[in-house]
Image (cartoon, rainbow, N blue to C red):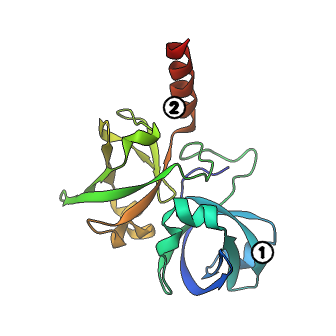
Amino acid sequence: MFTGIIEDLGEVESLEREATNLHIKIRSSLAKELKIDQSVSHNGVCLTVVSCNNSSFTVTAIKETLNKTNLSEININQLINLERGIKLGDRLDGHMVQGHVDQIGNCIGIESQDGSWLYDFEYDPSFGNLTIEKGSITVNGVSLTVLNSRTNGFSVAIIPYTFNNTNFKYLEVGSSVNLEFDVIGKYVSKLYSNSAIS
């Protein structure tokens, strides 16, 4: 479980394919504090540390993960949003994030707003996911508040701190992003759908 508050920008050091798996080695200041079997969020994707040293660590993404997230598009030297799992008793500064990406979205607009930025995203509504105005959404692992909620998209406002400390500053129109919709909203939507059928 995560909160969507990014701790570090990790740099992809190497990519190694083994059958349908992808081993991703990441240089990060968090590496010296990690241990094998620990869960870390990578652009919102929960992956398990399989090896680590004082400067870098390695995780493995399987075919299912690569098919459903933007980790299939990563390159050497790319910066990835990183967050370690929360500890019981810690403050929940973002919102409850599982690290299970629901689907990929696309950036369709970026607008500078004199001190902040408005990013606009769209996604395929046929997956059954939804947003609500002022609700929570996770974009590339970052906990954000939904603006301009609509059937197939939404916007988010990015403050300078988030812009400077996440990979939002590298997004362009056309960039793909990992989306995790609010877990509570997903359960409510599922219950509503089931009651409508019965």
Name the residue rendered at 34%, 62% in the picture.
Answer: 160
Q: Dividing the picture into quarters, in which one does residue 15 lie?
A: bottom right
Q: Is residue 119 above or below residue 48?
A: above
Q: Secondary structure at mark 1?
A: strand
Observer-nearest of 168 and 14: 14
Name the residue rendered at 41%, 40% in the picture.
Answer: 126
Q: Amino acid at mark 2?
A: Gly
Left or right of residue 190: residue 50: right
Name the residue tied to disc 2.
185
Is residue 154 in view? yes
Q: Position of residue 63 (x, y in %)?
A: 63, 67
Left or right of residue 48: residue 139: left
Q: Amino acid at mark 1?
A: Val
Q: Position of residue 195 (x, y in %)?
A: 55, 14
Is residue 6 in view? no
Name the residue tied to disc 1.
50
